Image (spheres, rainbow, N blue to C red):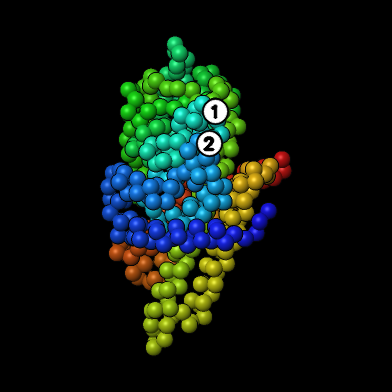
Amino acid sequence: MKFSFSNEQEQFRTMLRRFLSEKSPVSEVRRLMATEQGWERDAWARLNSDLGLSAVHIPEAYGGQGFGFVELCIVMEEMGRALLCGPYFSSVVLAANAILNAGSEDQKQTLLPSIAAGETVAALAFTEENGVWDSSGVTLTAKAQGDGYRLDGVKSFVLDGHTADLIVVLARKPGTSGDEGLSFFTVRGDAKGLERRLLKSVDATRKLALLKFNAVEADLLGEAGAAAAPFARTLDQAAVCLANEMVGGADHLRQSALDYVSMRMQFGRPISSFQAIKHKCADMLVDVELAKAAAYYAAETAAEEAADLPAIASLAKACASDAFIQTAKETIQLHGGIGFTWDNDTHLWYKRAKSSEVFLGSPKYHRELLMQRWNV
């Protein structure tokens, strides 16, 4: 287990932070969040042509760069810091990992190169209107018909599902429950019988959609009825990536609060010199650094494919969620009256903190999972 980043990884982080600060300023975030799509294909193409970020962790055999999971989490942390508006989490973290975990060799060779190149934007549809994040909430059915399958049901809270070119869908065989009868399927975004609708959400920088499947033709991904283990692994990997994204956002807020209190004058002195403010800043630093430690440890655990990844993933998700939302609250307070206004940028990261807190499961949910998985 490594306890620090290599020089190459630090250089990669520095280059990526500089690039995102130029290409994703707050003015661009505000512009894109006001659109229905939430991102632009031209900007997405430039992001991947200039840096190849969609290909970071995808093996070279499938058109990727073949770096590890740690590098992927560095990308997520810097994107969380910049609040990048783009389908990276949906396409690269969720959908690509699902294909890597569940797909056959031929399917990986067919589907992954276009995702790695940024030409295909993919999404993973697994959550339904019941809001359950694990396999027990899956009710959408897949019925064999001829050489293919037909999907019937509804998926909700699908990240970038309204704009994805390819949708990886988790469905079950009729009459099954729990982990039994689960399979992954792929569906084109323009498939006949598929209805897609954008959902209203707190965080306009991260678009969620509701998908209705009415006898939609689908292709089986991997083996029929064998998706439970790949799905669980995909969720654990996504939780690790989300934890790293959240610590990036939390660190941005912490620094913005420190910059403001160092500049804000009261009684002829910066308010950062007041003891109460010092305590708040110190508490924020401790929260963020502890969350970073958990997120980085989880990234290394995922990279090593360690057996305790499920427990560590839940630990990192819960810790980062708490740190992000608490730092967002303190940042608003330290900005005083202007911290609550639309013109102040703090609310953008606060809303991302609220949405990330419950996305893939709340801190309470993951602490319960941690206890169950740790005992195992």
Q: Position of residue 32 (x, y in %)?
A: 30, 51
Q: Is residue 366 above or below residue 185?
A: below
Q: Nearer the viewer, residue 33 or 2?
A: 2
The residue located at (39%, 83%) in the rendering is 266
- Front residue of 82/115: it is 115
Distance Cα–Cα, label 2 vs label 1: 10 Å
Query: Toward which corner of the image does residue 121 lie, by quadrant?
Result: top left
**Residue kind at label 2, given as amino acid type:** Ala
Q: Secondary structure at mark 1?
A: helix
Residue 309, how many percent across, how many down? 64, 44
Callouts 2 and 1 close, C-beta under 8 Å? no
The answer to whether residue 374 of the structure is visible from this angle is: yes
| Residue shown at the point (64%, 48%) measured from the top left | 301
In terms of image quadrants, where is residue 129? top left
Q: For this view, does 321 lie left or right of residue 351?
A: right
Q: Amino acid at mark 1?
A: Glu
Residue 105: give its label: 1
Q: Quadrant of residue 337?
A: bottom left
10 Å crowding of disc 1: few (<14), some (14-19), many (20+) = few
Crowding at dot 2, Cα within 10 Å, few <14 / some 14-19 / many 20+, comes out as few
Per the rendering, the mark at residue 61 is 2
Question: Relative to 4, is 216 above or below?
Answer: above
- Asked whether residue 127 is in view, the answer is no
Q: Provide residue 59's location: percent of width, then percent of height.
A: 54, 40
Q: Say the numbered circle drawn on residue 66.
A: none
Quadrant in which the C terminus appears: top right
Q: Residue furthest top?
A: 146
Closer to the N terminus: mark 2 or mark 1? 2
Residue 188 on image: x %, y %? 37, 28
Task: Look at the numbered disc 2 and give the secondary structure of its residue.
Answer: helix
x 65%, y 59%: residue: 3
Between marks 2 and 1 in the image, the one whose residue lies nearer the viewer: 2
